[in-house]
Image: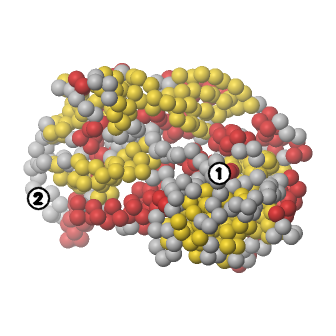
Amino acid sequence: MNIERIRNFCIIAHIDHGKSTLADRLLELTGTIDKREMKNQVLDKMDLEREKGITIKLAPVHMEYKGYELNLIDTPGHVDFSYEVSRSLEACEGAILVVDSTQGIQAQTLANVYLALAADLKILPVLNKIDLPASDIQKCSDQIINLLGCQKEDILAISAKTGQGIEELLNKIIEIVPAPKNEASNHTRALVFDSYYDEYRGVILYVRIFDGQINKGSNVLMMSTKAKGIALEVGYLSPGMVPKDKLANGEIGYIVTNLKSTSEAKVGDTITLENLPANVALAGYKDINPFVYAGFYPSSNEHFQDLKEAIEKLSLSDSALRYNLENSPVLGHGFRIGFLGLLHMDIIKERLEREYNLELVVTNPSTDYLIILNNGDEKDIKSAFELPEAATIKEIKEPWIKGEIIVPSQYVGDVIGLIIKKRGLQKNISYIDSRAIIDFSAPLANLLTDFYDQLKNITSGFGSFNYELDGYRVEDLIKLDFFIASEIVDALSVIVHRSESQRIANETVSKLKDIIPRQNFKIALQAAIGGKFIAREDISAYRKDVTSGLYGGDVSRKKKVLAKQKKGKERLKRFGKIDLPSETFTVMIKRD
């Protein structure tokens, strides 16, 4: 294909603004997929993506239209997966910015626009869902004009659901998205923008060719890892794999390699030819560091090896996943896993349970802390029970975030109140029409559990939120321990700010009282800072009614009680003399 007739673009938007539906219509109109084979969210390959109605993994696809080669990358919209968006942008020359005409510009819309502008892409603004009665094209157009400084005629109005305006959008893509640059070069360079491990074929790379070409059977070299391999097969995705003889400059496609691990072909690495290597690698990406950590344990230690193998396999296709071995006196052997956010954690948990048939106990999510010791050493810890003795600590630093909330202006007061409640600092307020953009900073740990739910609650669902890490700050932080029946449960320990310790202690022991079932003896639930107890609740013992459930009615009633009891026991962990439900270890998430 002549490079002048190639268009590489991606779709960016806030979550649930219609990216995947638009991708479906583009595939249908270009004849890439037959109508009888068409289904909703065709590029979302995981069952989880379909059930939740969100895109989790970026998905490239090759289309042909009016003699042009169109390479589309569908991207996620949730803030937890913004690293997927940034990778896609580097492989493209243009971006379709989709805005829901019933909702207007949201926080992730802004974040993605900033990413696209930083990557120097041509942005094509599109208003979607114009077929809905609540659509307000004029108001949303004004918001886009204020944001991008474009003209009203530059904004296309479409309905991805009905197909209205899609043909015009395709023509506009061909017209305004630039063709890839054709720079004469004797060397081959290709950017790896995604990779995954296939059990039967090895490591498969999604690449964008920037210089030269890669033929089937070429000996390739990864420039940063120095790993050498063979391009066993090359081709494009349409959306299934279509092999071809070579991938040339400007094209997006896949390479099946003989590499055994994705660690040999990192996302952002540059591929070149082994016999004629390039001198300078492509810019690549920033390393992604997780900042939410949780302990994952099998319900029974005999399944530890299964959990280990499952996490290793998942990490091959998820470059953001980090994990380390962890051991707890209560829960046994497990892993401390790092995530990019709570949704990322929830997705990994569900995939482990579904795809690998595991029963898991997950501990309260936390962030990492920098500990400065009295001797000047610095230590990075991922959980409260790694905290050294208080006497050896000079100071504790916690991560803070820079956040951006977009809400209708009538909710500004409530949102600022929520930010202050979370120990945050409101910095600036600006307006796009009737919407306020609130810039703030806050400690990450206070936003991990219920901040997003509370934001949606106080803004009647209209608030949207985007954030990025903003360094570490020294704060008055302490370790809060919890005791059940006079024995410390290390998996429940948390690091909190001293000013919030009493409230969190009271809320947590109260929640534990609701979650932990009664036993044959009285149980004391206590919270302590060091050797000082600051909160307590008691779970009373069972009453001695040994014949309950045995009389009255059919025998099936007794069987139903026994079946319910059996199901309950499967969810329990034995700690000393007490059976603890798995919900005990995520009590902090549910504390409000």
Instruction: Residue 258: tell me if it is visible.
Output: yes
Type of the residue with mark 1:
Val
Residue 217: which disc? none
Total numbered labels placed on residues in the image: 2
Instruction: Give the SS element for disc 2.
Output: loop
Front position in the image: 407 or 56? 56
Q: CA distance from mark 1 to mark 2?
A: 80 Å
Q: Would residue 340 appear left or right of 64 to someone viewing this image?
A: left
Q: Residue at x 22, y 29 (%)?
A: 389
Q: Would residue 355 appear left or right of 111 to someone viewing this image?
A: left
Q: Residue at x 78, y 64 (%)?
A: 70
User: Circle 1: is it few (<14), some (14-19), or many (20+) Cα within 10 Å?
Assistant: few
User: Circle 2: is it few (<14), some (14-19), or many (20+) Cα within 10 Å?
Assistant: few
> Circle 2 is placed at which residue position?
547
Instruction: Residue 238: tell me if it is visible.
Output: no
Residue 386: % across, % down: 28, 38
The residue lying furthest to the right in this view is 153
Q: Residue at x 78, y 73 (%)?
A: 31
Type of the residue with mark 2:
Thr
Indicate the quadrant where residue 440 lies.
top right
| Colouring used for the render | secondary structure
Residue 484: % across, % down: 18, 40
The nearer-to-camera label among 1 and 2 is 1
Indicate the quadrant where residue 254 lies.
bottom right
Front position in the image: 566 or 86? 86
> Circle 1 is placed at which residue position?
280
Residue 433: % across, % down: 76, 31
Residue 237: % across, % down: 67, 70
